[in-house]
Every structure is written in structure tokens, then in C-alpha cells.
Amino acid sequence: MNANEIPYKTYLSENEVPTAWYNLRADMPVKPAPLLNPGTGKPVTAEELGHVFCDALVAQELDNDTRFIPIPAEVCDFYRMFRPSPLIRAYFLERALGTPAHIYYKFEGNNTSGSHKLNSAAAQAYYAKEQGLKGVTTETGAGQWGTALSMACAFFHLDCKVFMVKCSYEQKPFRREVMRTYGADVTPSPSMTTEVGRKMNADHPGTTGSLGCAISEAVEAAVTREGYRYVLGSVLNQVLLHQSIIGLEKHAALAKLGVKPDVIIGCAGGGSNLGGLIAPFMGEKLRGENDYRIIAVEPASCPSFTRGRYAYDFCDTGRVCPLAKMYTLGHDFIPSANHAGGLRYHGMSPVLSELYDEGMMEARSVEQTSVFAAAQQFARTEGILPAPESSHAIRVAIDEALRCKEEGKAENIVFGLTGTGYFDLVAYKNFNDGSMMDYIPTDAELEANFAKMPKVG
């Protein structure tokens, strides 16, 4: 098949749910840098990754060449519970803004887990079950990934152990209880149940935790238990692969409407949503078929793209995971407890990092009070209470729509609404009470973390 003849429609079922995931790496002239073994400094092998991840997921993680990877029938059946997800035109928001722009959003919150995370959770739980494993371990920040994975594990009859970043564990008890209802064991991180957690608590008394630390604990829990593997909800190549279902559906829906997006906007923490949202459009851009403005939006309190370094770094605080070349704030970076949402990972997907470094997309950081102001405006006009993570994309979508108003341009703006915010009401309360504060790390704080990064080539 010629690279310029990618028949996305070939991989749609009758109800327009994709039957294959699209591997964006196959169309990247410069591939993401390989993961490195921190002990040897050499690219990690499938055998080494197999001690941590499921075998089928290892194959997907290392596959840079296969454009379309069939979705197993059992996963397709699972997807039918909530896919295709709707593409919605934000008529009421457009009217409120008085903009000539047309605003569309792909809504991924129409499932019990409340977010896009279920797209990869279903796949990873399926592969773990197929391998005959007893269960999986993972981490979660705001709780959306943990909620999705606990739901998928219940469906495929797997044990699920979740390490939840401590500040989120305390701020979002209802998200935690949804996980427990699905049968997951949920532990605040850093905990006293792992060596990594005990060391973190000793080194940083009273710490509210970080996603990097929770990853370390989850990996340790997996490799020390027979019949368990670790699964991750973002950053990795395999996760962006599974999330491509978002972009494929969006591509088909826009084509049916005869709409070509001018601007595509997604929130960015580790990269799962953004990578999936833009996949087929970025593929067209890489192949020279179409051009789009693609904007990654991240919190000013955790600005990996806009203030990070593009270098090899540990994927976790405990330094038990491989090294990844990515935009990073340093593996010791701990976001302020004042940071209300997810998007709190210290690094960014190697795929997206490479694309950003090549200038294929833009990045913007926004402060959380402005994010919640956008969330409030969206809720009052469109009737959906958005997740704080999604609201980063809403903020920039509004800003772009207002730019169109000033310039008199009727551009098509598309963003990803990754999930709902009904378990984030403490943050909404703080915003409504006027007690929410913005925090931006200083250059000195970031430099201190950069200095601790490994010295790799």
C-alpha cells in the first residue's frame, strides 16, 4: 500500500467504530528515540520489557512500522458499550463568544469511567487476560485512569492494584470509591507498602506525592508479584496507539460533514489524549497531504513542553523504569498540591516530544484559574461539566475562537473533551469560592530538577 493511500475508512465497522488502531510512528520519518536500559545505556529489548509489561503490549510498544494493528474482537465488543463517541458542534458556545469560528469537540466522557482512558484500559486488560495473568498494577493521578482500568479489569476478571497520588486520593474520595466499587485495591502514594514509597516518605516527609513516584510503586508491586504485570495510562507508544481510535472516529465524522479542521487542540499531560486525538491528522501532515495547526495545552504548574528539556530521563521518580527521550521537567519534579487536575506527569510522550521538537505542533501553558473560568463558561453554555484536564483545551479553544472574532475568520476549531468533572467538585468549589490559586514553578526550581537528570549522550 502506498503511504499516500491510507484508507482510514477501510478500518471502520458499520457503526463507524474503528476495527484497527492507527500507528502514527509508521509515518514518522524520524522515529521516537528508543527506551534505554539505565544500567547498560542500550535500547531495552523485548525480553527486558516483558518482565514489566504484557507480551502483546511489548510488541506494540516496539513496533515502528505497522500502520494498522487490528483491534481484537473482544475489545471491539467492549468498545460497543460506549463507542462511537459523539462529535458535537458547540453552537451555544459560539453564540456566547460571538465568533464566526465553528467549534467542534469530540466528547469522550460518555462512559462510566468518565474519560477517554477506557480506550486503552480495555485493550491492556484484554491482553493481560489473554496472557493468563492474575492481575495488573498501575498508578493514577486525578483518578480517571485508575477508574477506567478498574472497570476494564472487572469486565475481564482481573485483579487490579492502583497507586493513587496522595493529594488526589485525599481530594477526590468519590473517584477512589468508584475504583473500589469495581473491585480495585487503591493505595495512596507514596505508601509504606513498597521500598520506593518508604524511601520517598523518608526523603520528603509530608509529601503529597507525584505521578512519577506512583509509577515506581506500581512497577515494584508488579515485578515482585507472580502473575502480575504493570500497565500505564499515558506516555507509552502502545497507549497512544490505542487512543488513535479517538482521532480515527473524529476523522470519519468530520469527513462526513465535509469539514476540514483548521486548528486541532488537545490537553497534554503524558500525551494519551493528545496523541490519539491528532493521530490521523498528523499522519496526513507528515505525508504532505494536508496541513493543520495542532496545539498542545498543558498546565503552567507542570509545563513539560513549554519549559522542559528534551533529553533522556527516567520515566519515574524511583528510577526503576527505562530512560525515555522526552520533554521533561526532571524525574524528581513534584507538582504543587495546589494543582487541581491531572496532567501532572513530569515528562511527555516520546512520540509527541519528537513531533514537537520537529516543529510539527505548537504548545501553550495556561494557569488553572483561567482554565476553570473557561470550564465554567463551557458548562453554562454547552451543559457539560468538563474535567479540569479537558478544560485546558477548552481554554485555548475559546482563545482561538476570540482570535477568529478579532480577525473576522470563520475557522474550524476542533478540540478534545476528554471527560467529565463530576468527581472534581472540590476544585470547582475552590474556584467558585475564590480560593483557587495559580502556581508556576520558578526557573531555579526547575534547574534544581534538571541537574538531577541522568547524563546520557
Image (cartoon, rainbow, N blue to C red):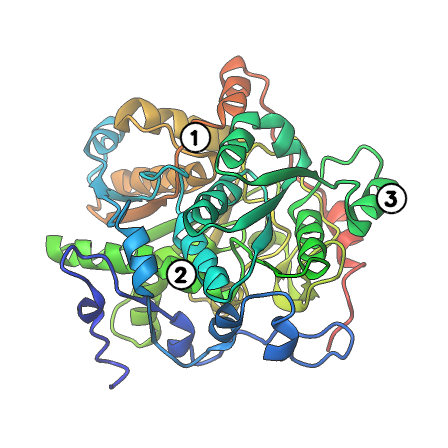
Residue type at mark 3: give it. Answer: Asp
Taking 375 as reference, is 287 above or below it? below
Say what secondary structure mark 1 lies in: loop
**Pointer 3 and pointer 2: residues touching (CB < 8 Å)?**
no
Quadrant in the picture for residue 11: bottom left
- Determine which of the numbered discs, if any, sits on residue 203 in the image: 3
Would residue 169 appear left or right of 113 to someone viewing this image? right
Residue type at mark 1: give it. Answer: Gly
- The quadrant in which the C terminus is found is bottom right
Would residue 179 appear left or right of 387 to someone viewing this image? right
* Label 2 packing within 10 angstroms: few (<14), some (14-19), many (20+): many
Residue 420 visible within the image = yes
Q: CA distance from mark 2 to mark 1?
A: 23 Å
- Determine which of the numbered discs, if any, sits on residue 421 in the image: 1
- The quadrant in which the N terminus is found is bottom left
* Label 1 packing within 10 angstroms: few (<14), some (14-19), many (20+): many
Task: Say which residue label 2 marks.
Answer: 242
Residue 232: x and y in percent read 55, 56
